Amino acid sequence: MPFEDLILDLLQQNVIYILLALLFIVLVFKSVRIVSQSEQHVIERFGRLHSVLGPGINMIVPFLDRVAHKISILERQLPTASQDAITRDNVLVQVDTSVFYRIIEPEKTVYRIRDVDSAISTTVAGIVRAELGKMDLDEVQANRSSLIETIQTHVESAVDDWGIEVTRAEILDVNLDQATRNAMMQQLNAERARRAQVTEAEGSKRAVELSADAELYASEQTAKARRVLADAEAYATQVVATAINENGLEAAQYQIALKQVESINKMGAGAGSSTILIPAQALEAFGDAFKLLKGKG
């Protein structure tokens, strides 16, 4: 038998085994699904949700199960959206917002909402308008962080049924029309002028207060010095009175004599004084003083 006929005969006899092997390979290929770390796959069986495949190697039933949706679970950022809103004090503002979110339950996102980005944008716009309508313009500018937290909380509550987690909501800018800007600039300039006047008036008031304090301090120091001198004189008078009381008239004459001697010494020490005329009564008084001095010695 020729060699070609032998090979053909062998193939005919083993064709069933070859077909079975090929079928097995195809079944393995169809049943194994490898899912990347950043995705989740939604599996349908006969058109209905069957399971959700996570990252790694997964097995499905070939020809019965199929991968209906491949959902990325990475965090997403919606395009910056601008919406008009009216504050409580009837000021028209344009708010630029941005929202970050990620899908945590793909089966809800796939079967409960068609366009998730558009749905979130519409929800954010409605919440922003509602919250700004409760606040004055000054409150919007001053409490932006709390406003962002309120918007994020309301958005999370609204999209909870869609299997979405809102990770961050931002108010990028709050724009005003030109007329409102001009009015605010005039108000700002007027406030600056008022503060400057107040500061100048407070400075003048402080200067007057400091001047009055200085005069009061000077008066207090002068009065204190006078009290000290008066106390000193009173003490000296008390000492003299005590001496007179204890020693009689001689103590008084002794003090008077000392004062007269001191006065004559000062007169004699003056410039241009060459001759000093002393009355006779003074000489008698000096004699008495010298006696007293001698007696004291």
Image (cartoon, rainbow, N blue to C red):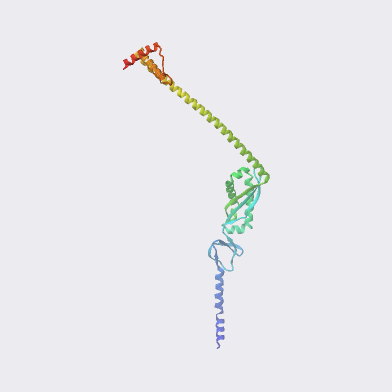
Percent of width and height locating residue 117: 62, 56
Percent of width and height locating residue 181: 66, 44
Percent of width and height locating residue 194: 61, 36
285 shown above or below 198: above
Residue drawn at x 62%, y 38% as measured from the top left: 193
Percent of width and height locating residue 83: 65, 50
Quadrant into which the C terminus falls: top left
In the picture provided, is 276 more to the left or to the right than 82?
left
263 shown above or below 189: above
Quadrant into which the N terminus falls: bottom right
How many marks can you see? 0
Residue drawn at x 63%, y 40% as measured from the top left: 189
**As rendered, which of 54 and 141 lies closer to the eye?**
141
Residue at the bottom extreme of this rendering: 1
**As rendered, which of 133 and 236 lies closer to the eye?**
236
Residue drawn at x 49%, y 26% as measured from the top left: 218
Residue 218 visible to an observer of this rendering: yes
In the picture provided, is 251 more to the left or to the right than 40?
left
**As rendered, which of 143 and 240 lies closer to the eye?**
240
Name which quarter of the figure residue 242 lies in: top left
Residue 248 visible to an observer of this rendering: no
